[in-house]
Amino acid sequence: MFGDRMRSDADELAARAEDAAGRLRDAGVHGIVLPYVDTAGVTRIKTVPTARLARAARWGVGMSPVFDVFLTDDSITASEHVGGPDGDLRLVPDLDRLTTLAAQPGWAWAPVDRYSQAGDPWPTCQRGFARAMVERAAAAGLTFKTAIEVEWALGRAGTDEFVPACTGPAYGATRLIELSDYARDLLAALDAQGVEVEQLHPEYADAQFELSVAARDPVGAADDSLLVRQTIRAVAHRHGLRPSFAPSVLAGRVGNGGHVHLSVARERRNLFSGGPGPYGLTDEAQAATAGILELLPALLAIGAPSVASYLRLVPSHWAGAYACWGHETREAALRLVTGDAGEQESAANLEVKCFDLAANPYLLFGALIAAVLDGMRQGLRLPPPVTGDPAALSPGELAERGIRRLPTTLDDAAQALSGCPPLRDAMGDVLTGAVLAVRRAEAQRFREVPDEDVAAALRWVY
């Protein structure tokens, strides 16, 4: 069995998997999807027949480590530690997240952790990195609640061009009426899969929708993000539709975000409410927010990891293009959400708006926790909040208030990550090297490519 955590209960895991496989077979499930997200943000999978679930839980399923340096077009780069045709890994399903897929009859789904053949956690397993950072936070007495908003644009199937699947206005009832059956089936499938949906509504861009789910622990929230997108795709396919989660579906238009919401608690008390600071922030919440704010340029290489991310990340589009924070300020990269009167204790959280769904959600949550812990370690303080649109300020006013424009290219974001000891130390040399290699190769791939062609090349990848 793989890893100390797993060797100790190999027989129990195999027995659980055998029992689960029996229930799945009785329910007509014939195969299990085993997904993980690679460094470029692409969800890769293997599948096993239901009868092989117990073996997969005990011994894992083989997968080459070279996928850690795959690019979005399936070409391959290399880092100092990863690359080439040698080696093998084991994908081990998490039985606690085993889910029957309501929109894919006959299939179930379980995210995986990756191990070496010797049974050691693989250093570029980004789900493992997120779990390790959760454990590091727990050792400091901190727990996180997190969620990712999912935005997508619905096109008509059968073409690589984007043909909007509806014509109604932004946030308009007409758009939902046009796609009422699709939206109903999506909600029904997510409910059947145990995903707690909080909101579903039409968004700003052409045929764009947004779905919000309940917050939970970071690893579980990242799993939810994968499962939600798997379900959105499957339901869309059954309706003759094609969803795009790309940061930029059409160049020059509003793109798809993947806003992160997070709160931090100590002894079950939400640190983002009930404190002496602005809008009820505690000193620790201020330090946590300041830690993220300070590292935002480097975090962008993780949370906005695509060349297309920088077609989306422009001022005056509510994308969070400036490194600043504000109370309910949708142009700031960090938006403090305090909630309505009477629910602040449970609802107060921080929204990070500059990220998108090209990000590996496990890597992103792990990096955010690292930034929070670094801010708390240093006891950082927040600058004054912003109001309005920072783009309306002069360069002198921006400098006077300490408001920075975030990196405008993937090259610049990768350079910021390269020079960021807190994130590099948390991720380790092997994972950091893989991330930087992929980011730089993606940037080079699109160096002379027009924006319209960048958007077209990445439209259906994520």
Image: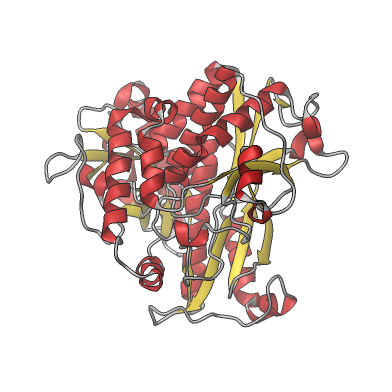
- In the image, residue 385 above or below residue 313: above
**For the point 72% across and 31% down, which residue is it?**
272
Q: Nearer the viewer, residue 251 or 67?
A: 251
- In the image, residue 70 above or below residue 19: below
Rendering quarter of residue 378 = top right
**For the point 38% across and 78% down, which residue is it?**
160
Figure quadrant of the C terminus: bottom left
Q: Position of residue 293 (x, y in %)?
A: 58, 36
Q: Position of residue 346 (x, y in %)?
A: 76, 36
- In the image, residue 267 above or below residue 114: above
Q: Nearer the viewer, residue 28 or 286?
A: 286
Residue 251 seen in the figure: yes
**For the point 63% across and 32% down, which residue is it?**
289
**For the point 42% across and 61% down, which residue is it?**
308
Figure quadrant of the N terminus: top left
Residue sitting at the far right:
341
Q: Nearer the viewer, residue 165 or 449?
A: 449
Say whether residue 7 is left or right of residue 264.
left
Q: Position of residue 9 (x, y in %)?
A: 37, 24
- In the image, residue 183 above or below residue 342: below
Q: Position of residue 119 (x, y in %)?
A: 25, 28
Rendering quarter of residue 444 = bottom left
